[in-house]
Amino acid sequence: MNKKSTKDILQAPRGMRDFFGEEFKKRKNFYKIAEEISERYGFSGIETPIMEHTEIFQKGVGEGTDIVDKEMYNLTTTGGDKLTLRPEGTAAIMRAYIEHGMGSLQGAQMLYYSGPFFRHERPQKGRYRQFYQFGLEVMGSKEARYDAIIIKTGYEILKSTDKEIIVEINTLGNNEERKKYVDILRNFYMKNIDSIGESDKSRVETNPLRILDSKDKNTKSVNENAPSILNYLGDDSIKHFNIVKKILEENNIKYEVIPSLVRGLDYYEHTVFEYITINSDGNKSDALGGGGRYDGLAETLGHNKSVPSVGLGLGVDRIIDITDINIDEKSNIIPILKLTNSTNLDIYIKKIIKELNNIKKVIIINHIQKFDKQIKFIKKNGYRYFIIIDEKIIKENKIILRSLKDDINEQININELKNRIREIYKKL
Ligand code: AMP
């Protein structure tokens, strides 16, 4: 056994970190925002153990993947059970879905979860051995609209960081098409075996799909001529993919089709996607999260029925590292105050709520009390800005945005409120 010095053991294990102070608050705030948005889209929470039987991941994630071959934290209990610290969420959630007979419940199950995951990777910026994900799954439906709902919900969560988010998307076709394509790809790499990178050679047999997104310089130039999955899709798969893309377009979600996007886990079919942002140097960031459809996973785990499903995992560590999520919970809420108690103003309140949807939660302050009492309440509770609806100017669609710190009133058109608030909060 590798004996450690006292100095070594007084440090967290490599690739694992402590969180406290502002970092702790930021993370907590991210989960809160993510949960709120997910619940708004109809998801409800689930929590599963931190360990599962090793086979869940061996079968689910698949032999030949980096995770199963190299990165799992495995242990044998004193009773002889082989358990693994979860390297990802989906296979475990599917195990829970099967165990609790969720298939007999009405409709597709829409679930969210969060927590630590473990992969024994080489630690570097944005890559840790204990990392955290916020995940979503829709289990029990083949419908392409759920692929889009998953992508959209993740997109909304990431948009709350105020960064530009781009969805990279691809399809792997159904299981048969994917298998056929993998064979075609294997043949292609066999023919080019001398030109691809050393580390990719062993993957030609085991997992040729992964060679497609290789970072190796030589492999990358071979990949320029690799066959594209998009030429091997059947009609149903094309239709499925088109529905997903159409819904994204209808929702103004920016996406790019990247035919080499395959993702590292074995269970995906049809839609796969990743979210990225643009770094300050103008380059694409590492993936902030990603996911896809996994119609065959339940059967791979040994279940006697298919449970078509789609899901995603957002990388909390990277999101916090790369983006600047608001650290102060209160800064995500904007109180609205009515100068007069007229129900005619309610339509304007609705307008404001709609305008601020996804960037700030709105609370309406009880207008029965005197105005200065209301202000006192807002101050005491640490709000920095609030909105005043004044009958005199609301007819022109204008409200007052008031800063408590410097006591400044600004008149703003409701349609411009979102941009102005984004601007202000970026500077805080
Ligand atoms: P995956 O479960 O591999 O699909 O990963 C989903 C997201 O989790 C990635 O896009 C990353 O943002 C994040 N992630 C995966 N592995 C790590 C890691 N070792 N350290 C930090 N974040 C990770």
Image (cartoon, helix red, strand yellow):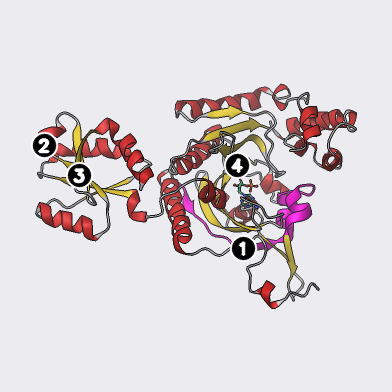
Q: Which residue is mark 3?
A: 408
Residue 141 at x, y percent in the picture: 56, 40
Decide whether residue 220 is among the magenta residues: no
What amino acid is at disc 1?
A: Ile
User: Between residues 228 and 179, which one lies in front from this camera angle?
Assistant: 228
Tell me if mark 3 has few (under 14), some (14-19) or many (20+) residues whose alpha carbon lies within 10 angstroms of its own.
few
**Could you tell whether 356 is left or right of 307 in the image?**
left
Q: CA distance from mark 2 to mark 3?
A: 19 Å
Q: CA distance from mark 3 to mark 1?
A: 50 Å
> Image point 72% across, 43% down: which residue?
266
For mark 3, give the secondary structure: strand
- Specify which label sits upstream in the sequence, 4 or 3: 4
The magenta region covers: 43-72
**Could you tell whether 89 is left or right of 79 in the image?**
left
- Specify which label sits upstream in the sequence, 3 or 1: 1
Q: Is mark 3 within 8 Å of ligand 1?
A: no
Q: Is mark 4 within 8 Å of ligand 1?
A: yes
Q: CA distance from mark 1 to mark 2?
A: 55 Å
User: Between residues 255 and 78, which one lies in front from this camera angle?
Assistant: 255
Label 4 vs label 3, nearer the camera: 3
Q: Are marks 2 and 3 in contact (CB under 8 Å)?
A: no
- The reply to whether residue 135 is visible in this rendering is no
Which quadrant of the figure has residue 381?
Answer: bottom left
What amino acid is at disc 2?
A: Glu
Label 1 vs label 2, nearer the camera: 2
- Specify which label sits upstream in the sequence, 4 or 1: 1
Q: CA distance from mark 4 to mark 3?
A: 40 Å
For mark 4, give the secondary structure: loop
Q: Which residue is mark 2?
A: 391
Q: Which residue is mark 1?
A: 50
Q: Which residue is mark 4?
A: 287
What amino acid is at disc 3?
A: Ile
